[in-house]
Amino acid sequence: MEMLVTKFSKGKYRNEGELFSEPISAGNVKLMGEMIALQALRTVKKYDLKIADKLYIGLIKDLHHMGEIDYIVSDGYDVAQTAICFLYQFIGRAVHEIYGKDSKGKEITIKLACYREIDGELMHLRRKAEKTDYIDFTDYKALPMDPVNCFEQEQTDYTKYDELVGALKLSELEFAILNCYMSGMVQSEVCTELGIGRGTIYHRKVSVRQRYCNLYGAY
């Protein structure tokens, strides 16, 4: 995320190392919280596509567009605010200083404690998502007008997609690029997400298309 640190600090910091080497202050606490939130979501989204992946993509878009007039931030920025509020308690201290001890008696830093604060917030969001309102079908008044179509989106089957992608035998990087585009990212966001250049993305996309055409013909 070195590029993001440089961009959003307007060149003040070249990388995260420079940012987090400074004591927490009113001038850098916002950027620190945003970068910690991004890193936490980037780690968790690898196995939590339902919650963390959506929040991560939203937060990326927020950071690029929140300065625009009438732009409405996504739920992803709530995670950044959690980190910012936590760090604000430690103005004047460095993130590598000891925060305290965890449940096992091991000392943890302020930065690590901030990551755990975010984990707690994500756990709360997961539990909230699991609370589903069910329709009482014993009462005809509660029935939807079209009980078949209202669940059509939930019944989407991705088996064919998984088989198709598996047959392409993509490299790890090609698969990551494909997933980014399937998540709705534009090229600049893919560059930021994967830390690679536009040329690399272009050549990998050409390779994926060629493999597809070789297997299935022109699309």
Image (cartoon, helix red, strand yellow):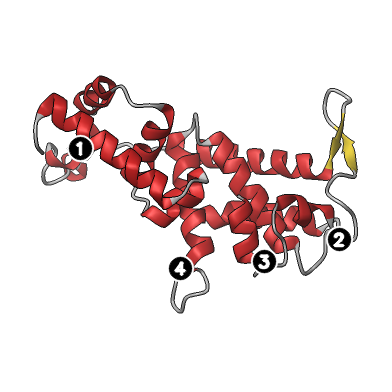
Are the residues tagged 3 and 4 within 8 Å (C-beta)? Answer: no
SS state under label 3:
loop
Disc 2 target residue: 91
For the residues marked 4 and 2, what is the alpha-carbon distance in whole angstroms?
Answer: 28 Å
Q: Which mark is residue 72?
A: 4
- Amino acid carrying mark 1 in the image: Phe
For the residues marked 1 and 4, what is the alpha-carbon distance in whole angstroms?
Answer: 29 Å
The answer to which of 35 and 191 lies nearer the viewer is 191
Disc 3 target residue: 9
* Label 1: how many Cα within 10 Å (few below 14, some 14–19, many 20+): few
* Label 4: how many Cα within 10 Å (few below 14, some 14–19, many 20+): few
Residue 215 x/y as whole percent: 15, 24
- Amino acid carrying mark 2 in the image: Ile
For the residues marked 1 and 2, what is the alpha-carbon distance in whole angstroms?
Answer: 50 Å
User: Is residue 60 among the parts visible in the rendering?
Assistant: yes
For the residues marked 3 and 2, what is the alpha-carbon distance in whole angstroms?
Answer: 18 Å
In the figure, 187 relative to 217: above or below? below
Left or right, 16 with respect to 163, comes to: right
In the figure, 80 relative to 160: above or below? below
- Amino acid carrying mark 3 in the image: Ser
Left or right, 82 with respect to 105, comes to: left
Q: Which mark is residue 151?
A: 1
Q: Residue furthest bottom?
A: 69
The answer to which of 120 and 90 lies nearer the viewer is 90
Q: Residue at x 63, y 49 (%)?
A: 37
Q: Residue at x 38, y 40 (%)?
A: 177
